[in-house]
Amino acid sequence: MINIAELDFQKSGGLIPCIVQDASTDKVLMLGYVNEEALQKTITEKKVTFFSRSKQRLWTKGETSGNFLHFVSILQDCDRDTLLIKAKPAGPACHTGADTCFNEKNTFNDIRFLDAVVQHRKANPKEGSYTNQLLNKGINKVAQKVGEEAVELVIEAKDDNKELFLGEAADLMYHYLVLLAAKNLQLSDVVQVLKQRHS
C-alpha cells in the first residue's frame, strides 16, 4: 500500500491524476483526479472516489449509475505525482455507456478471453453449448478429450501443415481449459504455479 503522505499533491494544485485499470483484463478504464480526501475515501470504502473538477466536490464513480469501481490495489509512479488504481468495474466505466472512457471493449485480448467464456458457460449453462455438453459428461470424458487432442497435436507437429497444426493446438487449448473448469480451477491458478516456479 502507498503512503499518502509521500505523494506530491502540490505539483498540480492539490490534485493527482489517477488512471483506473481493470484488475482482471488490464484494460485502462478511465482517468480522473484525486485529492487526499478522495484517495483516503477510496482506500477506506473500497469504491474509487475522485475529486470532480466540474462539481468541485468528491465524486464516487457510480454514485448515481450504480456502476461502481471496486477498489483492488493502488500504485504510485516514480515521481509520486500520478496514481494507478486497479479496480473491478460493476458495469460500464464511461458515462456514455461504453466499457471504457476510451471506447474500448473491456475484454481479455489473450487466452484469458477463452477461459472466461468457459467459466461463464460452467456457471451459466446454455442449451446446445458444446462446453456444457462436455462438462455434463463428467471429468473422465473431459480428460479423455484432452488426451485425444494432445495426440492429434503431436501427429500434426510431425507434418508441415501450419494451418492444421494451429487448429489442433487451438483444440487442445480449449479442451484443457474445459478440464480446468471441470476441476473447479481457472487458468489463473495454473499461471500462479508457473510464477512461483519462475521465482
Image (cartoon, rainbow, N blue to C red):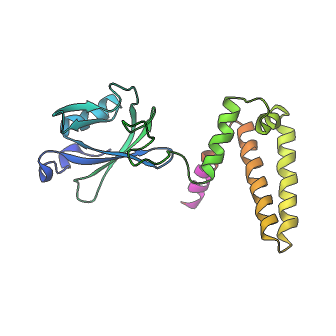
> How far from the left and from the top, in percent, is residue 145?
85, 47
Q: Residue at x 77, y 34 (%)?
A: 132
**Is 16 situated left or right of 196 in this image?**
left
Determine whether 163 is above or below 147 in the image: below
Q: Nearer the viewer, residue 190 or 28?
A: 28
In the rendered view of the protein, which quadrant contains the N terminus? top left
**Is 111 situated left or right of 86 in this image?**
right
Q: Is residue 33 magenta?
A: no
- Quadrant position of residue 194: bottom right
**Is 191 situated left or right of 25 in this image?**
right
In this view, the residue farthest toward the bottom is 160
Q: Main secondary structure of the magenta part?
A: helix
> How far from the left and from the top, in percent, is residue 154?
84, 64
Q: Residue at x 78, y 70 (%)?
A: 162
First to last magenta residue range: 191-198
Answer yes or no: is residue 186 visible. no
- Quadrant position of residue 150: bottom right
Determine whether 9 is above or below 134 in the image: below
> How far from the left and from the top, in percent, is residue 12?
14, 51
Q: Nearer the viewer, residue 162 or 76?
A: 162
Q: Nearer the viewer, residue 162 or 185?
A: 162
Q: Residue at x 23, y 59 (%)?
A: 79
**Is 198 situated left or right of 175 in this image?**
left
The number of numbered badges drawn on the structure is 0
Answer yes or no: is residue 149 visible. yes
> How far from the left and from the top, in percent, is residue 129?
77, 35
